[in-house]
Image: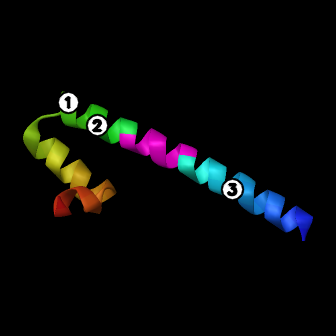
Amino acid sequence: MLLFSKRSERNNDKLEDLKAIKKKILEEVMETETYKNAKAILERFDPEAKKK
């Protein structure tokens, strides 16, 4: 049980790190790409941004 909880915790930490990296990359795309390209990328990789 300890192994499972440790592995689960490690995976959750890694997932949070990857989400932060993804958010940073998407923000960079919004700043550097043209509106049309940025919109297409955001629709594909961040559907929640479309809801905002």
Q: Amino acid at mark 2?
A: Glu
What is the distance, in whole Å, between disc 1 and disc 2 at their CAs? 6 Å
**Above/below status of 8 relative to 14:** below
Residue 27 location, x and y as percent? 28, 37
Given residues 25 and 41, the one toward you in this image is 25
Residue drawn at 27 percent across, 61 percent down: 48
Q: Is residue 33 left or right of residue 23?
A: left
Q: Amino acid at mark 1?
A: Glu
How many numbered circles are shown? 3
Q: Is residue 8 left or right of residue 29?
A: right
**Above/below status of 6 relative to 34:** below
Q: Which quadrant of the view contains residue 49?
A: bottom left
Given residues 40 and 47, the one toward you in this image is 47
**Main SS class of the magenta portion in the image:** helix
Residue 8 location, x and y as percent? 74, 62
Residue drawn at 38 percent across, 36 percent down: 24
**Above/below status of 21 relative to 2:** above
22 falls in the magenta region: yes
Residue 46 location, x and y as percent? 30, 56
What are the residue bounds of the magenta stretch?
Answer: 17-23
Q: Is residue 2 left or right of residue 38?
A: right
**Which residue lies most toward the bottom here?**
1
Q: Which quadrant of the view contains residue 47?
A: bottom left
Dot label at residue 11 = 3
Dot label at residue 27 = 2
The residue singled out by tag 1 in the image is 31
- Placement of the C terminus among the 4 image quadrants: bottom left
Q: Amino acid at mark 3?
A: Asn
What is the distance, in whole Å, between disc 1 and disc 3 at their CAs? 30 Å
- Placement of the N terminus among the 4 image quadrants: bottom right
Residue 35 location, x and y as percent? 9, 40
